[in-house]
Image: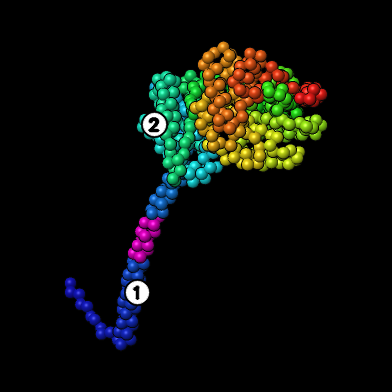
Amino acid sequence: MIIVVWRLPLSDENKALFERSYYRERKAREEAELLLENKTRELHLLNQDLEKKNAELLKTLKDLESVQKKLSKLAHFDVLSRLPNRLQFELDLKREIARSKRYGRHLALLSIDLDFFKNVNDRFGHDVGDGLLREVAKRLCSSLREEDCVARLGGDEFAVILTEINNPQQAKLVANNMIQKMGQPFLIKGHTVMIGLSIGIAYFPDAGDEAITLRKNADIALYNAKECGRNNCQIFTPSLRKQYSKRLGIGTELHLALERQEFFLVYQPRVDLKTNSMVGMEVLLRWQHPKRGVVFPDEFISVAEHFNLIIPIGEWVLRTACRQYVDWKKSYAPFNCTLAINISLHQFQHKGFISSVKHILQEYQMPSDWLELEITEATAVNFLGKIEDTLSTLRNMGVKLAFDNFGSGYSFLSHLKNSPVQSIKLKQTLIEDAHLRENDNLIIKSTIALSKELGLNVVVGGVETEEQLNFLRSSHCFEVQGYYSSKPLTVGQMTQFIEERNSKGL
């Protein structure tokens, strides 16, 4: 079959219609292609921007991670010493206790305080104090093994975990080594600084098998180290806990004693053997306990110092004694004797001590040379450099100064040549049987002779027998105090004592 296609020529109208349709389609296609190209370009730019944002986000995340690490370090490490802080140490202690329990090992916790660090800040400034803390941290680290832990808990408090320790004595050896290393002078910003360590040791598991118990018992041992004179270490034992609990009870009672006015003073005369006249009186503190009766200072003074009650108690003693002394002075003129009051190291170091003495003397219109402040020789030997400025200020005010309980002979006398101290009081144990013991006899006579050469007045306390009195006369020491002359007297008894002596012209 034959198919014949007959194509008629397009009319002008159809041709124009076709061309319009063609160009519309072409234009639409071109516009679509252009749109696609533009969208592709936009998508590419968006993708580039997204990649940039993603990179920025990754950088931000890394920066955030770095900041978090720094914050974590700040939260767990001490900036000054660069040691772990209290928070990190708690974690370390719990971890080491758990590890010791798991493997049946022992460890020791050392609670460490710098002795009288506050004095360094007060004397040299906080920059030197901060420098000292950094150097102390270095010396502590140098005393330990890599597997041990050391931290600064705050202020002048440090702590150490000794891992895999076989017995408490091994921990004590490490602690004594630390104390010895710390005994070497520090050179901080041109200043030579000396510092001591007090260390309490709690041995796991004997002193506790939980972190909180171990820390508490290490602190109790530390407290005992301070009570034993500082710059030493003590191992926790159950008996220390009993002592500590007892002292806490005394501390609470001392607070109440101040409020209830349970303290009272007694006065012991000081006599000149040449004239038999009273040349002074020593003020002695007593506590009228509601249940225990009269309590002597050696049972509570160290507790008062620990709880910082020695400052208000000491001020009460000074104020009460000066007021009473002025009353006697007014009532029984002429009354030429010195009022001697024992002052603790804590009082001498207290910032308000000088102003307190000035205020009390002014309040009672008491001439400063009527007052004599005594400090023990043991305190003077260890801390004279730290309180010398205070002593000099008191001396310049006219207050007399004395070293009490003196007994080291000339080993310390040489230091007194240029000191502001005017008197020494020999301790009682030196003269108990001095007339019978040749060595003590020689020590006392030599001390008296050398003291006089240095221009120091010598007083002997605790004189109880005529033999002691005769020995002192032969040694040319004429100022004595003790039961041979008079026991410590209450206000009423001292008033009667003064009246009787006045009536005899003494």
**Callout 2 amino acid:** Ser
Assess disc 1: are there few (<14), some (14-19) or many (≥20) residues with their C-alpha within 10 Å of its C-alpha.
few
- Residue, disc 1: 31
Q: In what element is the residue under mark 1?
A: helix
**Callout 1 amino acid:** Glu
Q: Residue at x 44, y 20 (%)?
A: 168
Residue reaching furthest to the left: 1
Q: Residue at x 32, y 74 (%)?
A: 30
Quarter placement of the C terminus: top right
Q: Which residues are magenta?
A: 43-57
49 in the magenta segment? yes
- Residue, disc 2: 143
From where the camera sits, is residue 492 visible? no
- Viewer-side residue, 401 vs 58: 401
Assess disc 2: are there few (<14), some (14-19) or many (≥20) residues with their C-alpha within 10 Å of its C-alpha.
some
Against 84, residue 266 (above or below) is above
Q: Residue at x 39, y 24 (%)?
A: 164
Residue reaching furthest to the top: 436
